[in-house]
Image: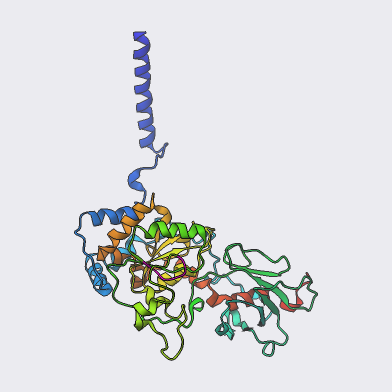
Amino acid sequence: MQLKSVNTFAITIMLGFTLIILFFSGFLDFPLHTSSIPSTKNQILTTISVSEPDPFSNLLGAFKKWDSQVGCAQFRGKHKGLLGNGLLLDSSSGSLQNVDDGELKCNELKMDHVSVLVKGWTWIPDNLDNLYSCRCGLSCLWTKSSVVADKPDALLFETSTPPVERRRGDPLRVYMDLEAGRKKSGYEDIFIGYHAKDDVQSTYAGTLFHNNRNYRLSPYKNNDTLVYWSSSRCLPQRNQLAKRLLSLLPSHSFGKCLNNVGGLDKALSFYPECIKDSKEAPKWWDHLHCAMSHYKFVLAIENTKTESYVTEKLFYALDSGAVPIYFGAPNVWDFVPPHSIIDGSKFSSLEELASYVKAIANNPVAYAEYHAWRRCGVMGNYRKTRAASLDTLPCRLCEAISKRNGRNAKAS
């Protein structure tokens, strides 16, 4: 029995030395902890833990402190070739179509002018109507008027179903659905959706999703109330999540859901400087960005957690100069600038998330870091997100129609 134990021990030692030799020779490649990129969350918490709490309200003052202690050169170096979640920036990730990389081959276009008549819509803004000068000399007429486009090359449907059949010589049928379900009508020749797999992708980024807003952003942030939240579609799952998180953080809720400010349309009572036009009755959207800008954080929860479904809820918060606390698309980092949002899914609990938010709120340098992407011009994939937005949809749709030769396309 004793001899067997000695032999077992000797064999174990030999195997151990063998593994060490193989490892250092490069035959085996175990992932080293030091070779992985540490999470931004842990880096910031480490920094904050050794610094005194410094509640602040002056955003520009926070920027100055960040400039002196960190600066754009260091931020660019940290995020060179990286997304905000520490993953390598990969243009082939599949979340966004490559619409601004010069990939259009002009010889693929079969028409030099395309007209699109919008037949059914809900939120497509009127000021999208225009005559556009696109790539390769293509001109694109986008209009809701059948007088302007009396013989369109394509008909765009958003709220209604396209014709069941299309004969040669008829306009191409385009169907658009940017809702989470993203269902095709079954009768379209071209489908527009928010996903890169669709014929033409349209993200929720860009300016045309929020026209007629007051962009008078506040340079001062509330210290006593940290989070802005507004929702009037009280979905049970979203409501439950918001209620749990907001019970842990000082917040204002302005919508119908979980309202705690004494009623609807109270934002202008809090911030009268956000009135867009004193001669007109205010609308909830015309002072949205201005009101958001008074808060350090905006809670943004999507209606549903779906891949690539990143909506205006997130982009409104970014544009307002607040830091979004986001719950939604699992691949959200493919759409936003590096280190620009707080991804709620990356925390083990809502309590941990709330503690992190409070720590950031009391550290001007750590908070200013969430704005560095804008100040230092570090866009990451956000550049591609904007390029694939509604702002550029007319030209991109007209290119797709031209490739199919418009009315002269085969019957379907």
Colour convention? rainbow
Q: Nearer the viewer, residue 184 or 115?
A: 184
Task: Please state the extent of the stretch shown in magenta in the rendering.
Answer: 252-257
Query: Is 119 left, or right, of 221 in this rendering?
Result: right
The residue shown at (45%, 67%) is 314
Image quadrant in which the C terminus is located: bottom right
Residue 217 shows in this picture? no
Image quadrant in which the N terminus is located: top left
**Extreme left residue here?**
52
Query: Is 315 left, or right, of 96 in this rendering?
Result: left
Residue 231 in picture, x, y percent from top left: 47, 68
Residue 64 shows in this picture? yes
Figure label count? 0
* Residue 74 sits above or below residue 43 on the image: below
* Residue 320 sits above or below residue 250 on the image: below
The residue shown at (43%, 91%) is 279
* Residue 132 sits above or below residue 387 on the image: below
Residue 35 in picture, x, y percent from top left: 35, 47
Residue 330 in picture, x, y percent from top left: 49, 56
The residue shown at (43%, 54%) is 345
Is-magenta flag for residue 253? yes
Q: Nearer the viewer, residue 129 or 289?
A: 289
